[in-house]
Image (cartoon, rainbow, N blue to C red):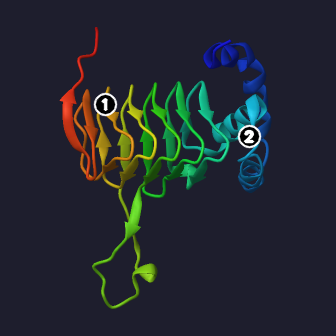
Amino acid sequence: MRGRETFELCEPILNCCVGLARALPRGVCLLLFEAVKYLPTNLGLAARYILLRRLARRCGRCVAIYDGVHLKSIDQLEIGDNVSIHAMSYVDAAGGVVIGNDVSIAHSCSIVSHEHDYKQNRVPIREAPSVRKAIRIGSNVWLGCGVRILGGVMVGDGSVVGAGSVVTRDVAMECVVAGVPARPLMRRSVAA
């Protein structure tokens, strides 16, 4: 049975559990989220989904957060429907991260929406204030393994980012990009 079919079968139970999680204090849910970070199998997927629905700014249907994914500043994270974030990925949403519908984020990706203000040379870089820059990942996007998305970037709908790429600029709709820094390779023709 495919993941979406399993989700639809279990959705009423998951929604009841989300209701129970909303009764818990936010701090307790954050601790539980950390506790189930490495829990494997469908039980782990379900626990992370339930807690993410409680903690995120928005979390759609059928969201799969695989074991070992690190999510920081979850309250600034918005995720659409049918999204998967695979193992060993890191998402820091301090500056705001919006992920559209039908997005696949392969393993070992990093999405970081803030950076140190390195231009302030009177203080050590690690003590410089943080500059927050929102990230928007459109719908129907695929991020290949090891992709890095830096703050202030928008990845257009229908785009593909090749494995190992570092995205420092906006990616146009239906575009395939790759490289360090990522550059356009071709346009996708998406069937209507």
Nearer to us in this view, 84 or 130 = 84
Query: 93 above or below 185?
Result: below
Q: In which quarter of the image is residue 188?
A: top left
Indicate which label's residue lies in the foreground, 1 or 2: 1
Instruction: Name the residue located 58 percent from the left edge and 48 percent from the top edge.
Output: 88
Instruction: Name the residue located 61 percent from the left edge and 47 percent from the top edge.
Output: 69
SS under mark 1: loop
SS under mark 2: helix
Residue ID for mark 2: 22
Decide if residue 28 is on the left or right side of residue 66: right
Horizontal and vertical percent for residue 113?
41, 56
Q: Which class describes the residues within 10 Å of circle 2: few (<14), some (14-19), or many (20+)?
A: some
Say what amino acid the circle numbered 2 marks: Arg
Residue ID for mark 1: 159
Say what amino acid the circle numbered 1 marks: Ser
For the N terminus, the quadrant is: top right
Horizontal and vertical percent for residue 180?
28, 52
Instruction: Name the residue located 78 percent from the left edge and 53 percent from the top edge.
Output: 28
